[in-house]
Amino acid sequence: MAERKARADALRNRETVLAAADELFARSESPRSVSMDEIAAAAGVGKGTLFRRFGDRTGLIRAVFEARIEPLRHAVEAGPAPLGPSAPPRERVPALLDAVLCFKLDNRHLSLALEEAGSGSPYQAAHYAWWHGILRDLLERMRDAADGTADGPAAGTAAGPAPESDFAAHALLAATRADLVEHLAGQEGMDRERFRAQLAAFVGTVLGQG
């Protein structure tokens, strides 16, 4: 019973810290400007607790990012079309990339801070590998359908050869990188709907629909 209570208390403390960090990050120009001291004070815990549970500020930024993106990941894993697994690949690929872009636009500074955290290549991050794997597999299915090794493309779609799957998945995700989103939406002032339309046109060209 005591062990169960300790685990419950630890979970509550973690959620309190994540909520406090999320609020401070949202109010700041960049999560990188928020100190661990500020987060600890807002959460009512000692700074040592933050370092023990999250390692450093990068680990805390990553934890907040993962908490925010979890609903989207759930929609991709188990939700309805067009994001969920029941959608045809040619419909699902553009929907997934649009959802990633919208998430980056809604979480510009948090996404940029994580991408620039200096904790190794962003391409080695677990969340990047997850998105890349899903897109690669969908593109592979499209290629197989075009080659006649699967059931064929969905009705009403063009049956052009799909691009090489692994590279194409990287190239498509590059169009949603946080630094590009920040440059276009922040420095160049591209509005949300134009950004989404430009991405949709690019994805359509890559998929042979342009």
Image: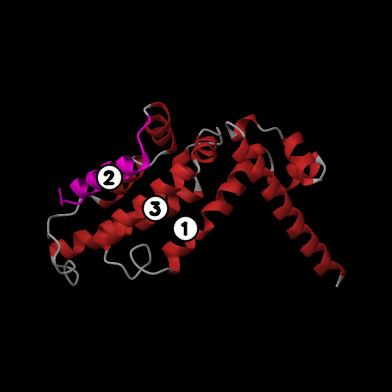
The residue lying toward the viewer, choosing from 176 and 132, is 176
Q: Which residue is mark 3?
A: 99
Which residue is denoted by mark 1 in the rendering?
Answer: 72
Amino acid on which the number 1 mark rests in the picture: Leu
Q: Nearer the viewer, mark 2 or mark 1?
A: 2
Q: Work out whether mark 2 precedes mark 1 in sequence or the reverse, and give the earlier one.
A: 1
Q: Which mark is residue 155?
A: none
Q: Is residue 177 magenta?
A: no
- 75, above or below 113, in the image: below
Task: Determine the secondary structure under disc 2.
Answer: helix
Q: Is residue 200 left or right of residue 59?
A: left
Q: Magenta residues, as a range?
A: 189-210
Residue 10 in which image quadrant: bottom right
Question: Which residue: 76% across, 34% down?
Answer: 37
**Number of other residues with Cα within 10 Å of mark 3, as a class: few under 14, some 14 to 19, many 20 or more:** some
x and y, in percent, of residue 58 in the image: 62, 38
